[in-house]
Image (cartoon, rainbow, N blue to C red):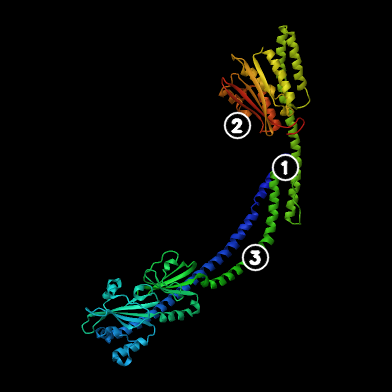
Amino acid sequence: MKGSRPEALRANTERIGLMMNLRWKLTTAFVTLIIIPLLLIGLLIFFVAYNLIEKKYSQQAEFSVKSIIQNMEYVFKQMNYVTDSGIANSVFETAIHARDPGSQDLTAADYIELNEKQRIFRSMLYGYPAISYAYLYNLQEGANVGVIPLFNKEGFITYPLDEWKKHPLYAKVMELNGLPLWVGPYEYPELSGFSSVFTQIRLVKEVSTLKKIGILTVQIKDWDIAQIFRAFGNNENLANTRFLLVNKDGLILYDPWEEAGGDNIRSYLSGEIEFKPGYQSFKRNFGGYESVISMEKLKAYDWYLISVASWTSLSQEMITFTKWIVGILSVSLLAAFLFFLVFMNRIAKSIGRIVRFMRKVEDGDLRVRIQQNGQDELHTLATGFNSLVSRVHALLDQVKQEQNHKMKAELRVLQAQIKPHFLFNTLESINVLAVQNEGKKVSQMVYLLGNILRISIQDREEISIRQEIEHLRSYLEIQKFRFQDVFEYELSIPEEVMNCSILKLTLQPLVENSIQHGFDGVDHKGLIQVKAEQQGEKVIFYITDNGKGMTNEQLQCFRYLQNEEEAGTNSVDFHQERRGLGVRSVADRIRIQYGSGYGLMICSEWGRGTVIQCTIPKYENGGSA
């Protein structure tokens, strides 16, 4: 019946152990079924809206880029029409064949002096105020004038004809055979200067013979281009969009913000950019800010129009939308948490508290009691737990007292095994001396034996180390009488440990083992050394002899001194081969009295002697360990 109570507690603990993870399970279910779905829905809505905004802007940017390109191409076409008219009306041919080509400046000439075709072309030039400069290269052999100005530009130095013929664009102009070639700002500053102008270059032929007689160069200011970008900049949806005109090498030809003209766009972009036909849109870091980049190539020119929109400005709408999502999710999560805390957390917390107390009981703390609140089933469970722990505590106290009585009985039995063994050997030695009529030695032996018995019969299990050493010295002197000075001994015990406690008859059986087994059959005088030292809270004795030592097989008999469980409990040979009942008794007594952290350790080698290490706790006589 006594043993059934701990089993009942264990069974209850196991049953309630199934509820240990109740709170965790409730939390997991709450997070899995409520929190995670809400978060996933919020994230899904966010990413869908995120992609829709990016897609929406990409479509809008594509429309804007294509519209701007059409308008820009229209400006260049109109200028092409002007120069086409000049060529068709032989205006440029007349200027080249004139007697004084250097005086053909249409802006400075008297309107009356001009022929009809020149007046018409001059009117067309004035109809395009964006025209900055116009001049002709005279390609006729033997011509006195290499450059013929048509529309003056103050401070502009024309690129020399000889150098122009070596320029890579010259071959390209000749290859186009009269079709216009447009050069953007900053592409060839030696031709167009460093101002923001677009330059048209085209070959001029005689109308009748198609002979190549000159090259026309016309520069137009960016006024019309700027007006196009301003018109699109006024669009509310494109207010934060930046447009750039770049060539295939990445050189920025035109920046309406007048900040990046002449720079390379790669210095603003993170990563590489690929210039290819068709529309492209991607997200990239531009000037240190995450941006959406859209670009498309102009059809008739090696230029690309790029739009740059800061993602921050684009995502303003997304931020507002996200705030709504976060607000709705927060309210939903708050409501869910309140439900969890009010209804589920109370039950889980109460059961968890009971489980924690049960774990304390499992760890040996039987003084815990659960505070009993309420009148529900949890209150009944707490009441039953407290009652069960109280009854188990009482039963364990009873078992502990019985174990203490049993331990003391074992100690008395072990001591009783040592005393008759020693007395028999000593009396046998006295008897031998008496037969030999060694009265003086008998007297000394009886005196020493009296000292030993006086210490042994004390009604205490522990004595001081000083008394134990006195007992050991008396024993060794008796053995020297018995074995006729076959051995010598040395005792080296520091004074600071003399008043510490030790179990009676601890050292004497160990020394007895050395005398009986260590010096048996040796041809040299034996030596027994007993030393002690203090190590922290321990006192360690070393009993050393120079006897014959032990073989590995003999040492196996003493394995139980380190770990009795490893020796096994069913090995008959093991118990039969144990050497020295005294050594075993000392080891068992120390283990029972002080625990598994203390005891004996034997080191020996055949022919080299034996060392026995005895470890006990350090505390003063009459104290507790």
Locate residue 425, reporting x and y percent. 70, 16
Q: In the shown orientation, is residue 286 left or right of residue 501?
A: left
Q: Secondary structure at mark 1?
A: helix
How far apart are the alpha carbons under marks 1 and 3? 47 Å
Please name whichever residue, 577 or 376, is drawn nearer the observer in this view of the structure: 577
**Viewer-nearest residue: 325 or 338:** 325
Q: Where in the figure is residue 172, as x and y percent of width and height?
A: 28, 73
State yes or no: discs 1 and 3 in contact (Cβ < 8 Å): no
Does label 3 or label 2 sit earlier along the sequence?
3
Residue 28: x percent and y percent? 61, 57
Q: Which label sits on residue 486?
A: none
Q: Quadrant of the N terminus?
A: top right
Say which residue label 2 marks.
566
Crowdedness of circle 1 by 10 Å Cα count: few (<14), some, many (20+)? some
Any part of residue 302 in sight: no
Asked if residue 158 is positioned above or below residue 530 in the image, the reply reads: below
Observer able to see residue 21 = yes
Q: Which mark is residue 334?
A: 3
Taking depth in this image into account, of 492 and 557 the one nearest to the observer is 492
Q: Earlier in the sequence, mark 1 or mark 3?
A: 1
According to the picture, the residue beneath numbered tag 1 turns out to be: 5
Residue at the spot 47% in from the left edge and 79% down from the top edge: 233
- Circle 3 packing at 10 Å, graded few (<14), some (14-19), many (20+), is few
